[in-house]
């Protein structure tokens, strides 16, 4: 049993710390608008524009992902650690991939709230910056590999469906 505490330090120049704290209002605003802007009457359940935008066929989910990605790019420019950026990107990607499925994806967006999750990741990092462990990277890589396979399968299915639609249209 350990009888001492392990202290991890992260020495940041003042401008670096200031740059990272500027991220919090951006992510808080994004989480509010995209995930918690509205409330179902008579309940405490909140939702934002993300599931509403997702209802637009073809463009909705992509538009939502692009909005979230702009904040992610800004976080990368502010030199947030790669593991935090990767986890944020995974949240956006999961929301986007499940959002592609009509009906189910929109319901998922009401629950998953990727922007809220990213804001919470940022808050945890600002409160107590930690170095990434090997297990963090193994987990992230495994999820990325799985998501890559899902995207490839989805693209393949979309290609065959599109090809079949074109074939049916050419008959007329």
Image: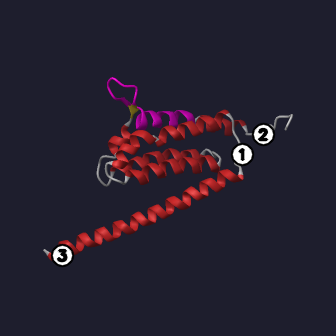
Name the residue tied to disc 3: 170
Give the alpha-carbon distance from disc 1 to disc 3, as whole Å: 57 Å
Q: Is residue 123 left or right of residue 61?
A: right
Residue ID at (42%, 36%)? 35
Q: Which residues are magenta?
A: 23-45
Q: Mark 2 and 1 residues: CB-CB less than 8 Å, in contact?
A: yes
Name the residue tied to disc 1: 131
> In which quadrant is the C terminus drawn?
bottom left
- What crowding class fits label 3: few (fewer than 14 Cα within 10 Å), some (14-19), or many (20 or more)? few
Quarter-wise, where is residue 48 in the image?
Answer: top left
Return the x and y of residue 7 as percentages of the image width and height: 80, 37
Q: Is residue 65 above or below residue 172?
A: above
Residue 73, visible in the rendered structure: no
Residue ID at (53%, 51%)? 90
Mark 1 or mark 3, which has the lower sequence index?
1
- Of residues 43 and 167, the one drawn nearer to the viewer in this rendering: 43
* 65 in the magenta segment: no
Name the residue tied to disc 2: 8
């Amino acid at each position: 049993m350990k009888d001492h505490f392990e202290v991890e330090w992260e020495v940041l120049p003042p401008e670096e710390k200031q740059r990272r704290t500027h991220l919090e209002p951006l992510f808080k605003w994004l989480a509010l608008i995209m995930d918690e802007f509205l409330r179902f009457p008579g309940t405490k359940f909140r939702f934002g524009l993300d599931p509403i935008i997702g209802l637009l066929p073809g463009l909705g989910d992509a538009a939502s992902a692009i909005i979230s990605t702009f904040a992610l790019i800004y976080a990368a420019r502010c030199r947030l650690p790669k593991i935090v950026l990767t986890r944020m990107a995974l949240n956006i990607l999961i929301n986007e991939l499940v959002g592609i499925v009509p009906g189910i994806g929109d319901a998922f967006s009401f629950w998953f709230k990727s922007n809220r999750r990213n804001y919470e990741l940022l808050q945890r990092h600002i409160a107590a910056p930690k170095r990434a462990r090997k297990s963090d990277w193994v987990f992230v890589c495994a999820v990325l590999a799985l998501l890559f396979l899902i995207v490839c399968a989805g693209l393949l299915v979309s290609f065959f469906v599109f090809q079949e639609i074109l074939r049916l249209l050419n008959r007329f």
